[in-house]
Image (spheres, rainbow, N blue to C red):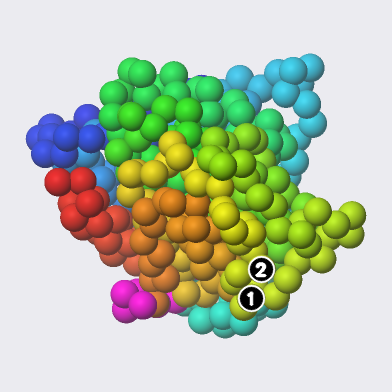
Amino acid sequence: MYVEVYIPSVSSEPYPLILFHGGGQTGVNWMGTPDGRMGWLDVFLRMGYTVFVVDVPARGRSAYHPDMDGPLIRMSADLTHCYFADHKGDWPAAGLHTQWPGAEERDERGYDKNYDELCSAQVEYVTPAYQQKLVQDAGAALLKRTGPAVLITHSMAGPYGWAIADLYPEHVKAIAALEPSGPPFGGISISSGKQRPYGIADIPLAYHPELRMPEWRREDKFCPPDVNDTTAWLQPEPAGKLVNLEGIPVILITGEASYHSPFDHLTAAFLKQAGVSVDFVPLAEKGIHGNGHMMMLEKNSDVIAELIHHWLQEHLY
């Protein structure tokens, strides 16, 4: 796994941050915004954190071996635009998306030049379950070098945080999960169908007692329940507990206008039922409005980084 480490000239925070990008992305996600502002790498450095930025295995600057790693997946520019940069999606809050740093200048397809900047950093990626196992192993190896650290994950990287903490819990001090892959057991919206057979991950996690899957997930035909029926997405009681994640504070952050806004509460509820200490933070409830899925790149990205910083201060010291 390709890793870069940045050390502030004045270090004030005892635990480093490890930034894990989402699907179709690389570590470039954290290094700057499409409209040229500082990325979270520099924002957190200025706060006094040592910051590790990765390209997950088989992605970007980490070697990809076709004979070992298998076929690649990609998202089209139109699909990416709909879910990341537009305000015309088919989920209820899509029209509230005001924080994308759009530009007046457009190309022949109608994309603004800042969206083209985002697209220029999009890459192909391997299948989720295989990627999660690669990152779990590489992430644990990285933690052996860094010592105790905070994991910041985005989107497809959500399961990376759960899987790394499950393998190496004594070295994960906290997890900030930005719209992690969800909801439990299945995909809706941008990706649909049976996914995450371990609830919040596609690879095994340690549950005690054993994970109990809801009956609808066992059916041959994927027919998920309504997202407003939270209990339907949970384990039947008595629920298995994520024993290695107990005691690790988690903040799960959701943008007001994101396609995740209809269902991230289900992921939070699943974590709580499984014994995880999670603070579910819809940004709008903090007075932070208009964010889509790519909140670390949007116009108010610094405000969200500051929210994470204050949460870490409250939960780690």
Closest to the observer: 201 or 291?
201
Q: Is residue 235 left or right of residue 257?
A: right
Give the percent coordinates (x, y) of residue 68: 74, 18
Closest to the observer: 260 or 233?
233
Question: Amino acid under label 2?
Answer: Ala
- Callouts 2 and 1 close, C-beta under 8 Å: yes
The residue under label 2 is 232
Residue at image position (50%, 46%) is 241
Check disc 1 and report its element: helix, strand or loop.
Answer: loop
Give the percent coordinates (x, y) of residue 265: 52, 68
Mark 2–mark 1 distance (CA, rounded to whole Å): 6 Å
Give the percent coordinates (x, y) of residue 144: 36, 18
Question: Amino acid under label 1?
Answer: Asp
Check disc 2 and report its element: helix, strand or loop.
Answer: helix
Residue 239 forms part of the magenta stretch: no
Closest to the observer: 2 or 160?
160
Closest to the observer: 72 or 149?
149
Query: Picture quarter containing residue 53?
Result: top left
Residue at image position (62%, 35%) is 204
The residue under label 1 is 229
Give the percent coordinates (x, y) of residue 275: 44, 51
User: Magenta segment, which residues?
Assistant: 285-293
